[in-house]
């Protein structure tokens, strides 16, 4: 324990904390349970740390990760109704929030169902699916900057777009949402969305979801399929046969092999299609 509400560990394996299952060891890993503890920690540790959500959009290098890694828990997973606003801790999983909102007769998140993420991670990554974004019913967020200052930001002050949000320059502590009544159709809608997701995406093996952002001219998966890369393998990593924008881990996939497949894909798509693919996955090195 370094201070109240914080546990520090050395040499924590990061691979198992990601959905792709790749990554070396964190030199220092802080499990932070209180907002005041996080503020003190950020003041103390100086260099900008990595914040780990559910690890579903991460490609972490092998070997030692020197930057401190922070995982939020405890107070950061609290959910409570305050008047019309539902206050959601940033480490809350989307799946939990959807169930909670359904029970409370609220909807609005149906189209996001199935994204294996925390609310903080979604807000920091500009997550969206089926024309719904995590920002749609957001009212405000509470954040801590990397100097340890806690403050609120209104939705209108956040700069966000497809797979981008300036909240990734800070630590999201909690988010206030104003969800609409669910008019009794939410459950059916969620069932259909999950069905569509399972039909289109590859959930059979570990992955980090889409590796590249879609291009205005075409979906990245279509471009990768058109240049003949579906099923391409390097070591234990493979471009999914089901969804060409997914790289799946067949067991012992490494950062090096993922990096090779990503570079090779970019190169071939550029040569054959003249389109530069941009990475959606976040790299930690
Ligand atoms: C099978 C599968 C399907 C997916 N489908 C979709 C989809 O349909 N749409 C979509 O948008 N994404 C999708 N993703 C990608 C991923 O789930 C999202 O990007 C998600 O928002 C990442 O959230 P996370 O909690 O896992 O964050 P992580 O992957 O842990 O982190 C992502 C980024 O957010 C930052 N971060 C995490 N928590 C905080 C915080 N509290 N404060 C500040 N920064 C923070 C991290 O530092 C990192 O930069 C999918 C992934 C998988 C594996």
Image (cartoon, rainbow, N blue to C red):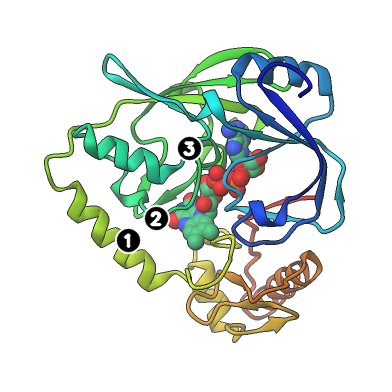
Q: Residue furthest left?
A: 184
Q: Is residue 214 above or below residue 147?
A: below
Task: Using the numbered discs, state the Cα–Cα distance from disc 1 to disc 3 in whole angstroms.
Answer: 18 Å
Cβ of disc 2 within 8 Å of ligand 1? yes
Q: Are marks 3 and 2 in contact (CB under 8 Å)?
A: no
Dot 1 corresponds to which residue? 194
Q: Do the residues labelled 1 and 3 touch (CB within 8 Å)?
A: no
Task: Using the numbered discs, state the Cα–Cα distance from disc 2 to disc 1 in whole angstroms.
Answer: 6 Å
Any mark on residue 141, and which? none
Q: Percent x, y for residue 260? A: 78, 72
Q: Percent x, y for residue 107? A: 24, 39
**63 or 265: nearer the viewer:** 63
Relative to 236, is 132 on the left or the right? left
Can residue 163 be seen? no
- Count all numbered tags in the image, as a single digit: 3
The residue shown at (83%, 23%) is 45
Cβ of disc 3 within 8 Å of ligand 1? yes
Mark sitting earlier along the chain (3/2): 2
Dot 3 corresponds to which residue? 119
Relative to 142, is 254 on the left or the right? right
The residue shown at (77%, 72%) is 257
**129 or 28: nearer the viewer:** 28
Relative to 71, is 48 on the left or the right? right
Which SS class for mark 2?
loop
Dot 2 corresponds to which residue? 114
The residue shown at (12%, 43%) is 184
Task: Using the numbered discs, state the Cα–Cα distance from disc 3 to disc 2 in whole angstroms.
Answer: 13 Å
Can residue 105 be seen? yes
Q: Do the residues labelled 2 and 1 touch (CB within 8 Å)?
A: yes
């Amino acid at each position: 324990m370094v201070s109240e509400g914080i546990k520090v560990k050395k040499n924590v394996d990061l691979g198992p904390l990601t959905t792709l299952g790749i990554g070396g060891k964190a030199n220092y890993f802080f499990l932070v349970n209180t907002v005041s503890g996080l503020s003190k920690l950020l003041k103390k540790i100086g260099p900008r740390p990595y914040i780990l959500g559910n690890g579903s959009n991460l490609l972490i290098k092998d070997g030692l990760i020197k930057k401190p890694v922070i995982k939020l828990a405890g107070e950061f997973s609290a959910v409570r109704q305050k008047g019309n606003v539902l206050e959601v801790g940033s480490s809350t999983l989307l799946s939990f929030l959807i169930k909670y909102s359904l029970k409370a007769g609220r909807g609005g998140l149906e189209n996001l169902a199935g994204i294996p993420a925390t609310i903080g991670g979604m807000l920091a990554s500009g997550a969206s699916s089926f024309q719904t974004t995590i920002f749609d019913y957001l009212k405000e967020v509470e954040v801590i900057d990397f100097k340890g200052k806690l403050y609120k930001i209104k939705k209108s002050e956040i700069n966000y777009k497809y797979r981008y949000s300036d909240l990734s320059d800070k630590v999201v502590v909690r988010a206030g949402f104003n969800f609409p009544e669910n008019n009794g159709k939410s459950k059916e809608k969620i069932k259909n969305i999950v069905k569509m997701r399972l039909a289109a995406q590859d959930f059979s093996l570990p992955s980090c979801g889409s590796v590249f952002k879609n291009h205005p001219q075409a979906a990245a998966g279509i471009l990768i399929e058109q240049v003949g890369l579906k099923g391409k393998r390097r070591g234990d990593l493979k471009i999914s046969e089901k969804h060409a924008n997914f790289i799946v881990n067949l067991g012992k996939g490494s950062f090096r092999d993922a990096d090779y497949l990503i570079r090779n894909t970019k190169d071939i798509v550029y040569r054959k299609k003249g389109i530069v693919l941009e990475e959606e996955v976040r790299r930690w090195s």
